[in-house]
Image (cartoon, rainbow, N blue to C red):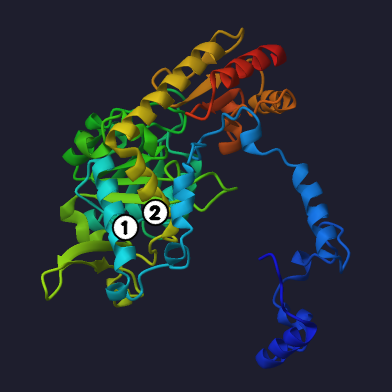
């Protein structure tokens, strides 16, 4: 908010209305140890608007924007080009000010784009039905595990070692009271024998492809092994652009797909908001969390849209609810829908091919640097390299040379001493040939 209109009298009136003597009384439940007693930015109590703008501009100038340097970070959040038309359309007032279809009969525009969004997600993932989005990929994965436990009435979830560690931690947190979560060993650049871990108590196996190290996994044998034991396969996709080239999870036997859609229409924004994608087989439809928009006709035979299923406690009896989660903020999946519509099937495939070509060329350049080797041999637009020294030190040194090199695996697995020399690198259509050459040159200089 650029302008705060409240006066001291306004604040006093509000405090009086709620029965608080002063601001300290309002926040009395906050532990004293958590209260900051000084200004975080050493700002004066009052200042003119021009002076404040200049001061904040000076603070902002101390931060290096991702787009101003060659940028190769990925690991679940990817920098892609978002056409200006996407932002232009979603900022129309009828989209920007609406939140969620609490009165669906008069929110036909919102329901229509949610229906189109669901169709796109179902086609991308190769599944039969998709919901109207979830908050992000990690919580979508956790919801998929809860759903699998309901469907199979079994307690155990097996997580691949290649599942993004933050996703695995989210699953463990959410599913802690509903069953057992078992994590397979981490094997960077290689596929663990997860099929051997499946038993008669297994509700689901959770496998990410491409995994957190960039490795493309063949899901078919895992699906067959899971189904032979009566378990479900949950496929996780953190880079949705990969489905422009890789066979969709549904065609590989997945029963549930949980994915992150941030790459399409949603720029990286300091951790969010993101857009969770969720799709499944039609036979599991009534166990799917969130909202489902359907198409119908009205009394006059005209096409219309309805909330076919809203299986959260807000809409139905709490004991009947599949989840307390709903859609995300709506604007994110609208941005996804607009961007994907502008790309079209051919454009989406071309975007995927461009990403793969960029990553392949970069991998060749980096592998040619003395002391560097590829830990991931089969990848889409992201791969892991092994360095002769700790990756954190290399990344810091490369920042000084004007290159944001990637994500050290030790940031994701801080307690694993075996990953300190591993660096996850992502290349997208936003990386020029000059960016890749600068990365390889700088890396050779710091090693």
How would you rate the neighbour count of disc 1 (Cα within 10 Å): few for under 14, some for 14-19, many for 20 or more? some
The answer to whether marks 1 and 2 mark residues whose Cβ atoms lie closer than 8 Å is yes
**Mark 1, secondary structure of its residue:** helix
State which tag comes first along the sequence, 1 or 2. Answer: 1
- The residue sitting at 84% across, 62% down in the picture is 39
Q: How far apart are marks 1 and 2 (CA)?
A: 9 Å
- The residue sitting at 40% across, 51% down in the picture is 276
User: Which label sits on residue 167?
Assistant: none
- Residue 322 in view, yes or no: no
Which image quarter holds the C terminus? Answer: top right
Name the residue carrying label 1. 113
Q: Position of residue 427 (x, y in %)?
A: 50, 26
Q: Where is residue 300 in the image (x, y as percent from the top left)?
A: 11, 74
Above or below, 440 relative to 180: above
How would you rate the neighbour count of disc 2 (Cα within 10 Å): few for under 14, some for 14-19, many for 20 or more? many
Q: Where is residue 355 in the image (x, y as percent from the top left)?
A: 43, 26
- The residue sitting at 26% across, 62% down in the picture is 293
Q: Give left or right: position of 383 versus 57.
A: left
Name the residue carrying label 2. 333
**Residue 46 lies in quadrant:** bottom right
């Amino acid at each position: 908010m650029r302008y705060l209109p409240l006066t001291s009298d306004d604040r006093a009136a509000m405090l009086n209305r709620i029965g608080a003597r002063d601001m300290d009384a309002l926040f009395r439940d906050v532990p004293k140890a958590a209260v900051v007693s000084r200004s975080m930015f050493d700002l004066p109590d009052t200042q003119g608007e021009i002076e404040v703008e200049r001061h904040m501009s000076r603070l902002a100038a101390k931060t290096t924007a991702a787009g101003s340097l060659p940028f190769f970070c990925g690991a679940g959040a990817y920098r892609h080009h978002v056409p200006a038309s996407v932002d232009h359309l979603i900022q129309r007032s009828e989209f920007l000010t609406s939140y969620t279809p609490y009165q669906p009969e008069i929110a036909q525009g919102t329901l229509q784009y949610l229906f189109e969004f669901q169709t796109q997600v179902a086609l991308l993932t190769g599944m039969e039905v998709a919901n109207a989005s979830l908050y992000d990929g990690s919580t979508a994965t956790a919801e998929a595990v809860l759903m699998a436990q309901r469907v199979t009435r079994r307690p155990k979830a097996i997580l691949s070692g290649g599942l993004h560690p933050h996703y695995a931690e989210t699953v463990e947190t959410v599913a802690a009271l509903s069953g057992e979560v078992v994590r397979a060993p981490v094997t960077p650049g290689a596929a663990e024998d997860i099929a051997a871990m499946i038993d008669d108590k297994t509700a689901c196996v959770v496998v990410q492809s491409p995994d957190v190290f960039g490795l493309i996994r063949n899901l078919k044998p895992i699906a067959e092994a899971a189904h032979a034991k009566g378990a479900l396969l949950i496929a996780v996709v953190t880079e949705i652009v990969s489905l422009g080239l890789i066979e969709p999870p549904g065609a590989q036997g997945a029963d549930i797909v949980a994915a992150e859609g941030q790459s399409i229409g949603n720029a990286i924004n300091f951790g969010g908001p993101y857009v969770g994608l969720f799709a499944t087989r039609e036979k599991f439809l009534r166990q799917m969390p969130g909202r489902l928009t359907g198409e119908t006709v009205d009394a006059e035979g005209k096409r219309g849209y309805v909330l076919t299923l809203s299986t959260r406690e807000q809409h139905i009896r709490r004991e009947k609810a599949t989840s307390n989660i709903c859609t995300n903020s709506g604007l994110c999946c609208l941005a996804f829908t607009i961007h994907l519509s502008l790309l079209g099937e051919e454009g989406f495939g071309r975007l995927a091919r461009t990403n793969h070509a960029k990553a392949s060329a970069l991998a060749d350049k980096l592998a040619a640097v003395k002391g560097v080797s590829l830990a991931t041999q089969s990848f889409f637009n992201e791969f892991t390299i092994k360095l002769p020294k700790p990756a954190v030190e290399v990344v810091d040194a490369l920042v000084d040379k004007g290159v944001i090199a990637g994500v050290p695996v030790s940031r994701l697995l801080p307690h694993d001493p075996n990953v300190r020399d591993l660096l996850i690198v992502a290349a997208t259509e936003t990386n020029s040939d000059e960016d890749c050459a600068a990365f390889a040159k700088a890396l050779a200089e710091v090693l």
